[in-house]
Image (cartoon, rainbow, N blue to C red):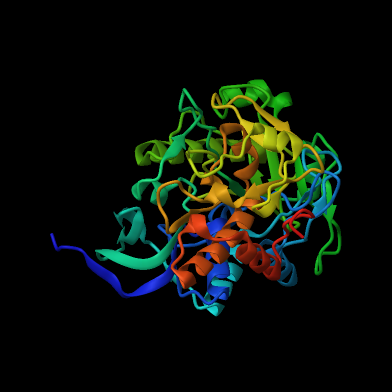
Amino acid sequence: MQTPGNLIEDTFDVLVAGAGVTGICAALAAARQGARTVLLEPRPFIGGNAATGLCIHTYKTKNGRQVVYGIAQEIIDRLIEQGGAVGHVPLPEGYVHSVTPVDADLFRMETTAMLAREGVTILYNTALIDASTRDGHIESVLVCSKSQLGYIKARFFIDATGDADLAVKAGAPARVGWPGSGAMQPVSMMMRAVSVDTARACAALSEFESAWASKRGCPDPIPVYFHGSFTRWNQQLRELGVYDHDDHQFWTNTVWPDQLNFNGSRMANIDGNDPLSLSRATVELTSQLQKLGAFLRANVEGFERASFLPNAFVGVRETRNLQGLYELNEDDIRVGRKFADTIGQGCFPVDIHHPDGKSQQHIDVGGDGAYDIPYRCLVPKSVENLLVAGRCISVTQYAHGATRNMAPCMTTGESAGIAAALCSQQSMPAAELPMSRLQPALRRAGVYLGEMAA
């Protein structure tokens, strides 16, 4: 076996591991600060869960005050121009004020173009293998591409893997699953349904008042978001082997009159860190969705001519969380706490799917409906040139139910990208970056820091 050498000879200013929504925002933000940036992605495409058709939650508090801006809003604005989004649509009856559906393919295409315009080097099909550290400082990462093992060097690193993969390989401590048991929230797989009469499907399935929107080129409003349960078909779905429990809930979203993104699968007892476990989930969830698609086509109005396309990969809700300088907790979410070192706000309610796969709960954010995300939640205790962003930031199991969703992940990604660029420029450890430098840079970029940081 050939000894690994440098995959790329030059040293980057910032390396971002993971090109889901978090990593995209991190890489864009770092590059816009003048940092030479490389983005690693093990799949042959970027976008993560947004590229599956999952609805982006959520930009506005329960009372309708928008707190998520910056690159997260810029992407939506660009997609609206292309017909790939309809903005933030009020949800009359639901656990959030408004929903932000996007077209999965247009999201992937537009963010790819945005990264190219900023000069970000994207390495597709490139898996993170290990990190080379010395005295708490990452010097390089070992990656596996299609043709070789090789090292990539950078001055500063961002873990946007969702699973804290880079942080753990670099020696940072992390919590795995729920304290005590290690249990994790169940995984799911999205499904796209095409050739659907979405208005009739909404009338047949929705159990609550739905979100409707108009868009250029479509003569009639579109039911862009509706949800409910399969309670009336419990026995039939059990007999078909779709679910092993009753009253299964589902959510749909779309920006088209003839397509639906269907979030109606779930599988418990899957370890998102274990490739064998994830592979088993991929097989079983694909089968589950094939059965569900056949059921919908045969039994539910609006789906008579539909075709169903289960997604190519499993959506993971929970694996590891960094143990950083601060751990956002239940009380912080319940009171909507504000922090002096805020790097943005989140407003998605606590959304916990029980590890048994049979129930879930939503709990509103307290106070004014938004909580600050402290910079310290992104900073490891023992690795000086690393920040962690997205699903795996330093939060308790309870707070994770709020911070794991895409809108707050995009906020932490952008903020980490700006912070990493600043640290790289000054050869400064992450823990020493003063808020007097970071917060003005965040505000100039359009990240909303709340009233206390104004």
Q: Is residue 119 left or right of residue 446?
A: left
Could you tell me residue 406's position as x and y percent? 62, 51
**At x 60% / y 55%, what residue is drawn?**
412
Count of numbered circles on the image: 0
Q: Name the quarter where the N terminus is drawn.
A: bottom left
Could you tell me residue 30's position as x and y percent? 53, 69
205 vs 30: above or below? above
Residue lying farthest to the left in this orientation: 1
**At x 35% / y 46%, what residue is drawn?**
171
Q: Is residue 126 left or right of residue 265?
A: left
Q: Is residue 52 left or right of residue 340?
A: left
Could you tell me residue 103's position as x and y percent? 66, 60
**At x 45% / y 41%, what residue is drawn?**
282
State which quadrant residue 11 falls in.
bottom left
377 vs 4: above or below? above
State which quadrant residue 351 falls in.
top right
Query: 31 or 434, which is in the foreground?
Result: 434
Q: Name the quarter where the C terminus is drawn.
A: bottom right
Q: Visible in this render: residue 228?
A: no
Query: 383 or 38, which is in the foreground?
Result: 383
State which quadrant residue 289 falls in.
top right
Could you tell me residue 318's position as x and y percent? 52, 38
39 vs 373: above or below? below
Q: Visible in this render: residue 208?
A: yes
